[in-house]
Amino acid sequence: MNQNYAKKVLDRIARTTSIRLTLLAVISAMIVGVVIIVLSDITSLREGDFGTAFGTVFDAYSALFIGSFGSLRALSNTISSTTPLLLCGVSVAVAFKAGLFNIGATGQMLAGGMFSLWVGFSMHGPGIVQIPVAILAGALGGALYGAIPGILKARTGAHEVITTIMLNNMAAFLVLWLLKTTIFQREGRTDPISKLVNPEGILPRLFWFLDDRKDLLAHTGFFVAVLAVIVFWWLLQRSTVGFEFRSVGLNPDAAQYAGMHTKRLMVMAMMISGAFAGMAGASEVLGTYGYASQNFAGNIGFDAIAIALLGRSTPVGTAFAAVLFGALQAGGRQMQANTDVPIDLIVVLRALIFMFIAAPLLVKAIWRVKATQTVEGQSFRGWGA
Amino acid sequence: MQLELRGITKRFPGVVANDQVNLTLQTGEVLGLIGENGAGKSTLMNVLYGLYKPDEGEIVIDGKSTQFLSPADAITAGIGMVHQHFMLVPVFTVAENVVLGIEPTGKYGTLDIDKARAMVREVSDRYHLNLDPDAKIEDLPVGVQQRVEIVKVLLRDAQIVVFDEPTAVLTPGEIIEFFGIVKTLIDAGRGVVFITHKLKEAITVSDRIVVMRRGLVVGEVEPSTATEGEIAEMMVGRAVLLVVNKKPAKPGKTVLSVNGLHVVDPDGRSILQDVSFDVREGEIVGIAGVQGNGQTELVEALTGLRKASAGVVALDGVDITNFSPRKRHELGIAHIPEDRLRQGLIGGLTIGENLVLTRYHDKAFSNGVVMHWDDVRQLSEDLVKKYDIRTPSADMLASTLSGGNQQKVIVARELSRALRLTIASQPTRGVDVGSIEYIHQRIVEERDSGVGVLIVSTELDEVMTLADRLLVMYRGRLVASVDPKTTSAMDVGLYMAGSSPDQLKAS
């Protein structure tokens, strides 16, 4: 099988990085973050006032923590950021387990969001019926959009990395166009913004009973995300098709030898992956916004790739990574409000985490971890030696 | 030059690949380094070549302790290595390949290809290697490619040349030529290390044989006095049966019938041409041939992994030419694939999961949606016991097993069910002597239970001893059908090289 080099590297990251190394990578990134915060505090540095500079670090990191877990509001923000990250993270992880690199979570999320949006504003019924139908519609939309790169790969060998990136762009423009059509556009508006989801179709807020200011954003889409993680686990560990996914992902030649229908599995894996991403779109549209604007998918689909890799594509790992990213995002806002440290530091921290994950030897060298799991040692196991 | 490895220890996670190994190498002699897979031969040589840094021990050259941090250091010190898998650029010419990294340059830093040609010619003539500097690597037979590797090493002024399993890819004729080259090298005052697991070859060519087992040097033997049995015993640590015990075959009705099979590769080149043969119940049919003469494609066509472009494959009279691999499997065809790491096993799955890899969809293990892992575990525990797979638990990853035990997993999976036909391709490649003995016995037992067996192997000894009927493949055709009991290995070797004994006698 023709794998490109980038994918091999990502494969290695996803399969061989240990939990300990992942944690060390996160810690390393936080430490580099300290240096960045200190260096960015020019006034204090100029006066040689390191006390103040390190004070800023302390303030920033404590704001980061308090802003993500320190209060009910913080927790709510973390949950609401985590929900779509978790669903998209599972989406990318499923594809990864089947040996596919789905960069198209963004597009699938948009497709799913539009499907559920349509159900959301055109269906009238009790929420208990409407919400599940809308979420399933989101899953369907994502699955259909995910099927395209799957079929292209199975039929023509077109690499999914290329096709999913292209399909992301197509989805973005398709959404833009749809939002200007009479079916979707809100009456009386000229900008691309959709009709509102019917009130019964909105995902209920999690903390509505404690919410006097109506700004605790966390919604029941979170349960969908948690359920998705459980389904992902079940799929991998219990189901027959999951066994096939794992086999194809680990060794497509052996899977074919074993009589598995590798092409059909490719399409199925992309559809299931797309369905999870589609539900992320549904959760955003039905829960967070209540309508759709042009870029309701944001960067979530791309962050999800980092999350799946950080979580080594395992259900538990992906969940932890999504919570970490969600908390950073929620806490970042608080940090920006409390200190002069801009929220962009979060982007830097995420990039650093990812860089350290991608450079296990660097992390090992920094923390003097003995090489307990060298992958390179393989060569002594070849034939005839 | 005298080179000593003193007290070399190299550990990998979970294994000590070399444990306090001492070894002396000298120019002017051939040292045979022999041992099973995983005995630590290659690790030791990689330490010598600067690819691995030993955890303990030192390398001493002519009395001076040195350290090799990279292959470049080893090359400077006069050590050359010819790897089992050649490191050549297929689209480059011989001269271009040979000078890679030491390119002679002209006035303006351009490649002086004439100089490169002259260098190749000079070395080729001196050692009678008979190389054309302008030939493209991809057009050359494997034996010649190996000589290109040798020239590369010699041009870098290697005093001691290490050959890692050099004969694995050669025809019997090429092996004899290779031994000639080794002799020329020795006569020219160089030293040779010959890594192998083939006892006969080690005895033929070495001046001294060092035997390794489990990371230790277990002894040194004199090739002129030692017998194969003795060396095998040292390698394995117990007495080994080197011959296969089998009764004469009692062939029944035809199981597999192949008629006029053609296979064409995606570029339209013909790979198999008009292959026809039968396999009957209770007989072992062997297919001999040098690697790359269409055996791989034949097996793939028989097991459904490759489309036949013409011809008919029938099992018990049913045309299965276009059946899927799974369908064939269900009809009772077992397939032990030639490359267990590429096809036969999934290292990242557990031993148990691998044991059901080809029948996980059976009613016993899955209802179509959910896997019955408890039943899988039960079966795998039974099979681990029955097939003597050495592992603490069937829940370990298959990649943690040694080569021989990995092969036992495949054999257990494929043979532990009702069968009509067993297709085994290189069933013992890279497998330790002890496991070879076991696998051969299992294959003979299959035959005796009335299953048709097709063995494809490039190890001539293996097919000669196992097969009841031997077919020889050359360039995608079956060129001979012989009785292995009455035909000499030399004659079969001639067929494998594309000629026939009669032709030679006639001319």
Image: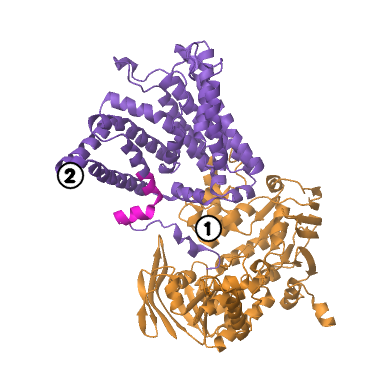
Chain colours: A purple, B orange
In this rendering, would A149 be left or right of A307?
Answer: right
Q: Residue furthest right?
A: B506
A118 to A37, vertically: above or below: above
Which of the two residues, A335 or B384, is positioned nearer the viewer here?
A335
Which of the two residues, B425 or A369, is positioned nearer the viewer here?
A369
The prevailing secondary structure element of the residues shown in magenta is helix
Q: Residues within 10 Å of mark 2 (few under 14, many from 20)?
A: few
- Residue A153 screen position, x and y as percent: 62, 41
Observer able to see residue B240? no
Question: What chain does badge 2 belong to?
Answer: A
Q: Looking at the image, which residue is at 53% across and 55% down?
A: B385
Q: Are marks 2 and 1 in contact (CB under 8 Å)?
A: no
The residue where tag 2 is placed is A46
Give the residue type that dot 2 points to: Arg
In this rendering, would A19 be left or right of A181?
Answer: left
User: In what element is the residue under mark 2?
Assistant: helix
The residue where tag 1 is placed is B389
Q: Bounds of the magenta span?
A: A352-369
Question: What chain does badge 1 belong to?
Answer: B
Mark in front: 2 vs 1: 2
B313 to B430, vertically: above or below: above
Q: Kindly indicate whether the residues beneath marks 2 and 1 are on one polypeptide chain.
A: no
